[in-house]
Image (cartoon, rainbow, N blue to C red):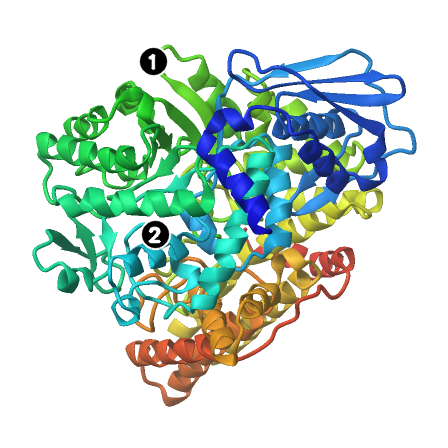
């Protein structure tokens, strides 16, 4: 972006949200051209005034063209996607795209008019930036921003490039490079660095990263604003470098710890005059670089408790945090994640929550009910005591790969809250998952709410979903999805998706610390869905979405089967039956190989791109190694060799299965086999220490993995179905 274009974008940002409420026809036309390049000339874009401050769109056929009207370029995107879904029966997801348009586009028989009931449609979570977006370049961001527009998002969290701003602020305050050396984390850990949970881990952060991501953030914001979105930028929460106590020895600092194996961090007390000063400096520097839409994210106590639960103290603290924003931007609106009220309910009782919220003017704060589909906090806080708030689906923790979701709850929850007399100022809906690029059905379902006030009827909705995803209505495919709805997607018993025992650190138990193997359904009940998808293969095999779904369901069945197989080998070991132990352990390792080979057929399930994309950001061999270590560490140990978060972000990815998980199990089986031969108990504690050292060595090793899919998805799914179907059913009897 040249300096004149950036200056123009920055000025628009300073003008505030109204500047983006108008239709940017060029941005709308470009979005259409990127989405349906061969058919872009069939669409005409026209402006339509907003309705009572809320977004609207219209679609109609006119003079051989499809006319898309909207009050901004983002609503034109929603109109386009509505047309593609409802009339051309298409679908665009992270994991499968169907854009097979007919030679002559279908006409719209009667003009469609849609008005959203929601002022805001929020998107992203601090964790998403780490678990999914750590290594994204502009090409990947461009696709995601288009996805946002097509799916009705208008309020994305936008925290890329934050470290560049802090570097400038602290340098201007006299901090040296040495002072900041241990402050900035590595890129994979920015989510928790930004929230004040850790300093320095995965670093030191190269200056080249800061410069490149400043430019990337400017592109991201320019595109989002051109599409009518109002990005949420970060604000100061009190998190400062450890060197702050040296530069400002009289500053009031709180030393705190996240309790997950990392060193203490430092929080500047909001009572200290420096708090408002630093906050003002940050917002001014950020606005100069990135503009503003006056929406600021700040979460001072993300999984860190305040020093006092006195309501008066909390109220004054909250007022001071907001005042720090207001001093830099009189129009500031504080966007607060409501996660703390869910995760630490022992501390955050009604008096504490009420005091924290009521200290800020109602029009200057928006609460995110971050996991409303799990536990709607608004119901026990009198709808956040009068503050505007947003109903969000969290859904995914850690970026794990698992078929999971609360389909019925997501279908009913937003509309039920919208019509609930006790819901107060519900102003929006949103998606706040920790990781994306999985379970696309949940995200299509959740964004269905953007343009309607009633809950989707799921049987009919799933029929439409299958038709759009696979290119035609298929009875067997629909039967599979009706089973998936009542099994993997029934949302009962567990908070988030279960993992496979395969990805856990080897154990004689049925679970590991962050490998929760309890399913929300009987695993045998998933098998008929697999049967129906295999049966649907002749009719649906050419569909990209079908190929993904067949691989994913096959993966889940195999992942589930690992647990009874592991129990068999453990039982054989405990009974000192060496022959059976060797038989079942060999089958367990073969299962990992088969799952890896299946997943290798889809780029969605490859480790290679995650590592390769990380290394691409490095300008030197040292930087490439740093980013590779970040990428590998986050999805395995998370921290150092003694990290209590190991496997929190586990992934069932081809390459990771055979190069990491399988090798660990092989070493475990050798230890157990040797103990059987020697007729003495295995030293499990010694194994754990040895495997931790091996894991840390793996994290720090240099290795490339395939970045392109190999093999045929349909053929591999049919192969594992033939090999395992009857064997798996027998294991559940």
Q: Relative to 463, does residue 549 appear above or below in the rendering? A: below
Q: Position of residue 91 (x, y in %)?
A: 71, 36
- Residue 274 vs residue 716: left or right? left
- Residue 46 vs residue 669: left or right? right
Question: Circle 2 — which element?
Answer: helix
Q: How many marks?
A: 2
Residue located 36% across and 22% down the image: 388
Tell me the crowding category of disc 1: few under 14, some 14 to 19, or many 20 or more residues within 10 angstroms, Cα based. few
> Is residue 20 or residue 257 the one in the foreground?
20
* Mark 1, residue position: 422
Of all residues, the one furthest to the bottom in this rendering is 678
Q: Position of residue 361 (x, y in %)?
A: 26, 22
Q: Is residue 589 visible?
A: yes
* Mark 2, residue position: 194
Cα–Cα span, label 1 and label 2 = 34 Å
Tell me the crowding category of disc 2: few under 14, some 14 to 19, or many 20 or more residues within 10 angstroms, Cα based. many
């Amino acid at each position: 972006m040249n300096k004149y274009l950036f200056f123009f974008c920055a000025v628009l940002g300073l003008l505030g949200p109204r500047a983006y409420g108008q239709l940017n026809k060029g941005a709308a036309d470009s979005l259409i051209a990127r989405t349906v390049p061969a058919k872009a000339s069939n669409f005409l874009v026209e402006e339509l005034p907003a309705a009572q401050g809320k977004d609207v769109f219209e679609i109609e056929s006119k003079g051989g063209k499809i006319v898309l009207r909207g009050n901004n370029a983002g609503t034109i995107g929603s109109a386009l996607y509505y047309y593609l879904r409802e009339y051309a029966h298409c679908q665009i997801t992270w994991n499968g795209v169907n854009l097979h348009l007919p030679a002559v586009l279908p006409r719209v028989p009667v003009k469609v008019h849609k008005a959203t009931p929601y002022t805001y449609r929020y998107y992203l979570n601090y964790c998403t930036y780490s678990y999914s977006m750590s290594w994204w370049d502009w090409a990947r961001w461009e696709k995601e921003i288009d996805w946002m527009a097509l799916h009705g998002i208008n309020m994305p969290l936008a925290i890329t490039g934050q470290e560049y701003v802090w570097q400038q602020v602290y340098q201007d305050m006299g901090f040296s490079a040495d002072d900041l050396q241990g402050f900035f984390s590595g890129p994979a850990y920015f989510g928790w660095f930004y929230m004040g949970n850790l300093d320095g881990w995965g670093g030191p952060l190269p200056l080249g990263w800061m410069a490149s991501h400043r430019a990337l953030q400017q592109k991201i914001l320019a595109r989002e604003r051109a599409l009518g979105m109002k990005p949420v930028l970060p604000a100061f929460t009190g998190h400062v470098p450890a060197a702050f106590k040296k530069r400002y020895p009289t500053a009031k600092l709180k030393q705190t710890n996240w309790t997950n194996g990392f060193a203490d961090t430092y929080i500047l007390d909001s009572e200290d005059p420096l708090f408002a000063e630093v906050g003002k400096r940050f917002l001014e520097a950020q606005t100069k670089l990135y503009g503003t839409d006056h929406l600021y994210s700040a979460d001072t106590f993300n999984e860190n408790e305040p020093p006092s639960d006195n309501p008066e103290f909390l109220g004054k603290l909250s007022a001071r945090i907001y005042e720090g924003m207001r001093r830099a931007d009189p129009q500031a609106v504080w966007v607060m994640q409501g996660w703390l009220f869910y995760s630490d309910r022992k501390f955050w009782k009604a008096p504490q929550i009420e005091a924290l919220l009521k200290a800020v003017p109602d029009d200057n704060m928006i609460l995110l009910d971050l996991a409303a589909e799990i536990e709607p906090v608004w119901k026990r806080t009198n709808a956040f005591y009068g503050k505007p708030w947003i109903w969000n689906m969290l859904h995914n923790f850690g970026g794990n790969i698992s078929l999971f979701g609360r389909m019925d709850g997501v279908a009913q929850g937003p509309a039920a809250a919208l019509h609930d007399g006790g819901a107060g100022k519900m102003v929006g809906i949103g998606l706040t998952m920790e990781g994306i690029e999985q379970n696309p059905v949940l995200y299509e379902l959740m964004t269905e709410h953007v343009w309607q006030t009633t809950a989707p009827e799921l049987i009919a909705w799933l029929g439409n979903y299958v038709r759009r995803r696979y290119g035609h209505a298929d009875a067997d495919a629909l039967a599979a999805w009706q089973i998936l709805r009542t099994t993997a997607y029934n949302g009962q018993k567990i908070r988030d998706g279960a993992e496979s025992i395969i990805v856990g650190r080897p154990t004689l138990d049925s679970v590991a610390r962050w490998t929760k193997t309890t399913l929300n359904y009987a695993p045998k009940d998933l098998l008929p869905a697999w049967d129906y998808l295999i049966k649907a293969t002749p009719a649906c095999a050419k569909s990209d979405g079908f190929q993904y779904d067949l691989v994913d369901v096959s993966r889940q069945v195999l992942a589930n089967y690992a647990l009874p197989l592991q129990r068999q080998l453990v039982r054989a070991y405990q009974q000192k039956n060496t022959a059976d132990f060797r038989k079942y352990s060999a089958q367990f390792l073969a299962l990992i190989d088969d799952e890896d080979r299946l997943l290798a057929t889809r780029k969605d399930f490859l480790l290679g791109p995650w590592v390769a994309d990380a290394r691409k950001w490095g300008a030197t061999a040292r930087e490439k190694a740093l980013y590779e270590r970040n990428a590998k560490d986050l999805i395995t140990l998370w921290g150092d060799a003694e990290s209590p978060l190991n496997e929190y972000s586990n992934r069932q990815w081809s390459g990771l299965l055979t190069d990491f998980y399988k090798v660990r199990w092989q070493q475990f089986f050798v230890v157990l086999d040797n103990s059987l031969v020697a007729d003495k108990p295995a030293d499990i504690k010694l194994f754990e220490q040895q495997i931790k050292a091996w894991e840390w060595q793996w994290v720090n090793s240099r290795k490339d993995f395939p970045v392109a899919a190999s093999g045929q998805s349909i053929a591999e799914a049919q192969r594992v179905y033939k090999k395992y179907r009857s064997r798996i059913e027998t294991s559940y009897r």
